[in-house]
Image (cartoon, grey):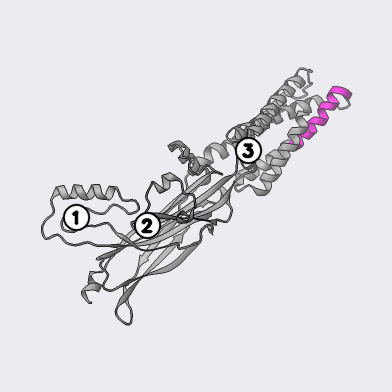
């Protein structure tokens, strides 16, 4: 019975992995599981013959070999199931692993005849080594391999006056370049421009004023730390434009590039002395997950649920919410883990804009992970953040010609 149940389940996982795993190692795991299921099926027939008929001289040896193989395979699947969420799969594979161990011991006690014990031992060692090495590659080496990171580029053009001379436009070219050999899902991409007032001090600013500036900028939600200056008095910037610059849920293939242009319009008599431009993107590796198309899930000002630790009690920050199902990169994890969902929050307010994402089980968006748990999540799904900015453009020359 242990052999037959193992044959069905290992064959099922093997076919799904061979057909749908996202990595080469996952496809190899599928092929190995299919081979193990055939071996287990053959072992079932050998056990029946060895116990009742003895019509085949080496049926005991075949049964013992199959029992060892299925014991190792069930043990490795048990390790994977134990890292998942399903109690049912943990119990099932604990029983199958224990049952296959008992079957191995029971067949061995029947004084199996080994015509070439060294060769049989070598075959068992080789098979076990391949299975263990493949499991170690997927679960130990692969999560810690060097990651790939696309490059976000941004070029700010010269301001162009309108025909009536009352306004001007600043063109901004944004690019996303993937020079790695893996593709990426685009979870979200945002661009925003900040208007900054930078008056000059009539006298040299003292060191104590620098300390005040440093304390002020350390509390900023979105903006990068501003420089400490002896003559410039940097003030908090104000959001003048924010927008997504590519679709959430789209993807970028290996070696591909994406480029777009946005334009920032302002009146010539703007009170700002300079503009600061930012662009960022949130990504996930295509060999670590399958992402369902992200769908709008509402917004913070119309009843959309935003985790408290993202909103942090700030009423002046709004969020647009997107959500999509996340599928694991192999069949075993997909069955033994509860469904995960990616929730993306595009946050914006007077002090800037940015992206925030969570991958959690349904209803657990508010749960805060530990540092180790957060790092494990990033490695598991190949999450990557890339961005550029601030790129600053002075408006003094434009305002001086007014």
Q: Which residue is mark 3?
A: 336
Callout 1 touching callout 3 (CB < 8 Å): no
Callout 3 touching callout 2 (CB < 8 Å): no
Query: How far across and how far down the image is residue 321, in percent?
Result: 49, 54
Considering only order in the chain, which callout, 2 or 1, is on the residue closer to the N terminus?
1
- Please rate how many residues cluster around mark 2, counting C-alpha atoms within 10 Å: few if below 14, some from 14 to 19, many from 20: some
Residue 48 magenta-drawn? yes
Q: Which residue is mark 2?
A: 349
Q: Nearer the viewer, mark 1 or mark 2?
A: 2
Query: How far across and how far down the image is residue 75, in percent?
Result: 65, 30
Label 2: state its secondary structure: strand
- Please rate how many residues cluster around mark 3, counting C-alpha atoms within 10 Å: few if below 14, some from 14 to 19, many from 20: many
* 360 displayed left or right of 168: right
Comparing 95 with 59, the one in front is 95
Q: Nearer the viewer, mark 3 or mark 2?
A: 2
* 12 displayed left or right of 132: right
Which dot marks residue 229? 1
Spatial separation of the CA atoms under disc 1 and disc 3: 56 Å
Give, as a single range, the part of the protein colored magenta: 37-53
Spatial separation of the CA atoms under disc 1 and disc 2: 26 Å
Query: How far across and how far down the image is residue 63, in percent?
Result: 78, 27
Spatial separation of the CA atoms under disc 3 and disc 2: 41 Å
């Amino acid at each position: 019975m242990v052999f037959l149940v193992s044959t069905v389940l290992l064959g099922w996982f093997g076919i799904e992995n061979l057909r749908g795993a996202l990595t080469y190692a996952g496809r190899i795991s599928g092929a190995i599981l299919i081979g193990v299921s055939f071996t287990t099926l053959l072992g079932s027939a050998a056990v029946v013959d060895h116990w009742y008929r003895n019509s085949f001289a080496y049926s005991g040896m075949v049964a013992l070999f199959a029992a060892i193989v299925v014991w190792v395979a069930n043990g490795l699947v048990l390790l994977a199931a134990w890292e998942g969420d399903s109690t049912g799969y943990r119990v099932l594979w604990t029983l199958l692993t224990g049952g296959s161990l008992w079957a191995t011991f029971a067949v061995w006690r029947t004084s199996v005849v080994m015509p070439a014990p060294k060769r049989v031992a070598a075959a068992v060692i080789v098979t076990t080594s391949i299975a263990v090495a493949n499991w170690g590659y997927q679960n130990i080496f692969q999560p810690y391999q060097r990651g790939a990171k696309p490059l976000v580029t941004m070029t700010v053009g010269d301001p162009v006056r309108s025909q009536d001379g009352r306004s001007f436009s600043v063109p901004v070219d944004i690019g996303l370049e993937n020079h790695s050999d893996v593709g990426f899902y685009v979870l979200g991409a945002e661009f925003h421009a900040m208007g900054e007032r930078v008056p000059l001090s009539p006298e040299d600013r003292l060191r104590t004023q620098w300390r005040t500036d440093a304390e002020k900028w350390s509390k900023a939600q979105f903006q990068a730390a501003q420089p400490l200056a002896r003559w410039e008095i940097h003030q908090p910037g104000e959001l003048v434009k924010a927008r997504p610059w590519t679709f959430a849920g789209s993807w970028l293939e290996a070696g591909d590039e994406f480029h777009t242009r946005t334009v920032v319009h302002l009146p010539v008599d703007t009170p700002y002395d300079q503009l600061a431009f930012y662009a960022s993107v949130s990504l996930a590796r295509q060999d670590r997950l399958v992402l369902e198309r992200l769908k709008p899930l509402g917004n913070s000002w119309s009843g959309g649920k935003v985790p408290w630790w993202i909103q942090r009690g700030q009423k002046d920050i709004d969020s647009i919410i997107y959500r999509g199902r996340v599928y694991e990169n192999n069949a075993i994890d997909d069955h033994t883990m509860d469904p995960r969902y990616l929730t993306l929050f595009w946050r914006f307010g007077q002090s800037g804009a940015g992206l925030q994402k969570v991958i959690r089980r349904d209803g657990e968006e508010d749960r805060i992970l530990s540092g180790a748990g957060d790092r494990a999540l990033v490695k598991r799904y190949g999450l990557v953040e890339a961005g550029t900015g601030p790129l600053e453009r002075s408006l003094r020359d434009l305002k001086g010609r007014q």
